[in-house]
Image (spheres, coloured by chain):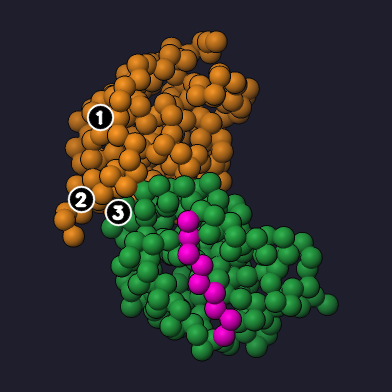
Amino acid sequence: MKNGNTLDRRAAVKHILADRGDTLTVSSLGGPSYDVAAIQVDFEQDFPLGGAMGQATMVGLGLALSQPKRRVIVFAGDGEMLMSLGSLATIGAEKPDNLAIVVIDNEYYAETGMQRTHTGRGVDLAAVATGCGFAVARTIRTTAELDEAAPLIRSAPGPIFATLKVSTDIGPLFPRNRDGVLQKAQFRRALLGKN
Amino acid sequence: MSDEQQGAAWPQTIYRLLKEAKVTQVSYVPDGGHKQLIQHCTDDPDMRTVSLTTEQDGIGVATGAWLGGVRSALLMQSSGVGNCINALSLIKNCQIPFLTFVTMRGDFGEANNWQMAMGQATPTVLEAMGMVCLRVEKAEDIEETVSAALRMSFSASQSIAVLLSQRLIGAKIFK
């Protein structure tokens, strides 16, 4: 199954996280956590979820509010984002200026047998984000649009929303740590030190 | 919430204990029983409050806060507990210290039959997801129980729900 999109998800995420500095990421279960880990597996500034579908954006909000000087980028699948549209309303109301939400939107539930999601049936996530009061909300289809949006995602006053219309290619899978306790401890130690 | 509960002292006690325990982020879905505590928290410039659209989002917010080094609490009504079940995977799988205050419906003296199913299932579903429930029936037990809950969550890294009974908050009266 194909969606006609041309952006490559792995390349797009890598582009956004180029020169990331001390940026923190949260990523949703399935593809997005692989997309982030493909750049640097088990990196301590990344917190990948392996379940709790729908919570990636809110983990990002809690982190952004507790670390206002750090940039926080959430990478969420389109299925994940559709499950938690209300979280966009909460982020829009709270207006954390250090938070960016990036949806890796392939318009399918790729994990479960390629069933179509609503984003391939006319639902416009960027319009939802605009309606929720995000400072910037973009739908990105080309590398030129990505080039223009990447600096906004990395550092413009937020909250920022971008949905990347990516092809259905998922990229290679590889071993990575899935121990949530270890991931939590590693992330906190890198961010907070040994206390 | 009965009129006499408007002036009850226990919400102020919970607020004071949260402050003493350095809880600085509070998320909530409003409930009549939590009205005073929400007001105390939103009035406090040193307390970051987050109004949620659904209770499960408080699980993610609490996880993110802990990852960022901040202690938080979630305020909700028992009817919202069911919304949280799968999200609690985050807390259990990552052993996130977590504290929630649940005002009970479908409990002692309930007059709305729609509240009974979730109210009666509340401790069962929380315990099924690995949480420890501490129930408060009387105002004089608030200080001891909330102190215990704070110690168990933030010192022992446990996941604790303080269930505030309708005996404590008063059953909602329908006329």
- Side of B168 relative to A21 (left or right): right
Please give the residue where the numbered disc 2 appears in the rendered image: A189
Please give the residue where the numbered disc 1 appears in the rendered image: A41
Q: Which mark is residue B141?
A: none
- Say what amino acid the circle numbered 3 marks: Gly
Q: Residue A125 location in percent, x, y?
A: 54, 32
Residue A115 in sight: yes
Residue located at (45% from left, 79% from top): B145
Q: Residue B173 location in percent, x, y?
A: 76, 78
Cα–Cα span, label 2 and label 1: 17 Å
* Secondary structure of the residue carrying numbered label 3: loop
Question: Which one of the lettered chains is coloured green?
Answer: B
Over which residues does the magenta segment extend?
B130-138
Letter of the chain that mark 2 sits on in the rendering:
A
Residue A59 in sight: no
Quadrant location of the N terminus of chain A in the rendered image:
top right
Q: Residues within 10 Å of mark 1 (few under 14, many from 20)?
A: some
Please give the residue where the numbered disc 3 appears in the rendered image: B68
Cα–Cα span, label 3 and label 1: 21 Å
Q: Is residue A170 above or below residue B148?
A: above
Name the outermost residue toward the left. Answer: A194
Query: Quadrant of the rendered structure where residue A101 is?
Result: top left
